Image (cartoon, grey):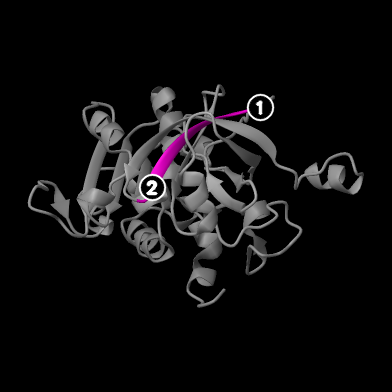
Amino acid sequence: MLADRVRDGLANPMAPRPARVLSRHQETADTVTLHVRPLGEPLVSAPGQITMLSAFGIGEVPISISGDPDDNSEFVVTIRKVGAVTHALSTLGGGDLMGVRGPYGRGWPLDLAEGGDLVVVAGGIGMAPLRPALYHALNRRDRFAGLWLAYGARSPADIVFRQQLKEWRGRFDMEVDVTVDRADAAWRGAVGLVTKLIPRQSFEPSAATAFVCGPEIMMTFTARALVDAGVPADRVFITMERNMKCSIGFCGHCQLGPHFVCRDGPVFAYADVAGLMRIREV
C-alpha cells in the first residue's frame, strides 16, 4: 500500500515526476486538451482516476485523465482555466514540461455495468472524466447492452470534444444526445437542461448503471432524475474533485463528511453521498 511505503520512507508520494507535453488542442476559449508523456515509466490509469498536475514554480491542481485508458503511450488531460495553475498549464505546448503525480483514487465501476445498459450524463467539462469510461466501453462494446451519452453545455461555444461527439453520433452502437442551455442562431440541436433528455431515452432503468459528472448542482438534479426514472440509487455514480491537496489521504482538505475524496473517491455511489450533497458547506 502507498501509505505503508510512505511510513517506511521508501517513497515520496508528494514529489512529482516530469512529463513532456506532446501536443495541445484548444477545445473552447478557456479549455485545452494536452497529450502528455511522462519521462520514464508510463502512467497507467483506470477510467475515472485523477492526476495531480504541477506547473513548476506556480503550484499543483487535481485534473482527471480524459484519454483512452487502453493507450499507455501517453496520457491525456483536459484543463479549464480557472486559476493561476490551470492558466499556466493551459499555455503549455509541444515540448514543454509539467509535473505529474498519480494516478489516484477509485474509478468508474465498469465491471458492475457490464451486461446492462450504461448511461453516461455529462455537463460542461464534466465530459472529460467520463470520456475514459466511454473509451473503455466502446473498446469492449459486446460487454454492454445499450450505451447512451447525454451531454449538456452552457452554449454551443462551450461544447468540448466537438469532433469526437460528431463521430460518436454517427455510430450505430451508441446513442448520443447533446443539448445547450442557451442556443445561438446557428444551433440546430436541443435546448434545455441535460436532465430533460433522460425521460425520452429507451434504456432499461432497472438494469442500467449511470455515470454522472458536471457541476455539483447538475449532478444532484441529474442523479435524482435518473432515480426517478427507475435507475437504482446504488447504481448511479458521480465523481467529486473537491479541494484536493495531497491526494493520499493525509491532509484532510478533501474531506466530504466521513469520506476523503482522494482515498474513497473520486467516484462515489450517489446513494452514499446524496445526504451530504444536500448539506451546504460540507
Q: Which residue is mark 1?
A: 39
Q: Main secondary structure of the magenta part?
A: strand
Which amino acid type is shown beneath numbered disc 2?
Thr
Vertical position of residue 43 compared to residue 12: above or below: above
Circle 2 residues within 10 Å: few <14, some 14–19, many ≥20: many
x and y, in percent, of residue 204 in the image:
31, 44
Q: Is residue 240 visible?
A: no
Q: Residue at x 40, y 31 (%)?
A: 144
Per the image, label 1 sits on a secondary structure element best described as loop
Q: Position of residue 123 (x, y in %)?
A: 34, 53
**Helix, strand or loop under label 2:** strand
Q: Earlier in the sequence, mark 1 or mark 2?
A: 2
Amino acid tagged 1:
Leu
On-image quarter of the N terminus:
top right
Q: Nearer the viewer, residue 175 or 60?
A: 60
Local crowd size for mark 1, using a 10 Å CA cut-off: few (<14), some (14–19), many (≥20): few
Q: Position of residue 182 (x, y in %)?
A: 18, 59
The image shows residue 211, relative to residue 191, as above or below, that is: above
* Range drawn in magenta: 30-39
Residue under numbered circle 2? 31
Near-viewer residue (208 or 65)? 65
Q: Is residue 122 left or right of residue 69?
A: left
> Seen from this angle, which residue lies furthest right?
8
Towards the viewer: 113 or 282: 282
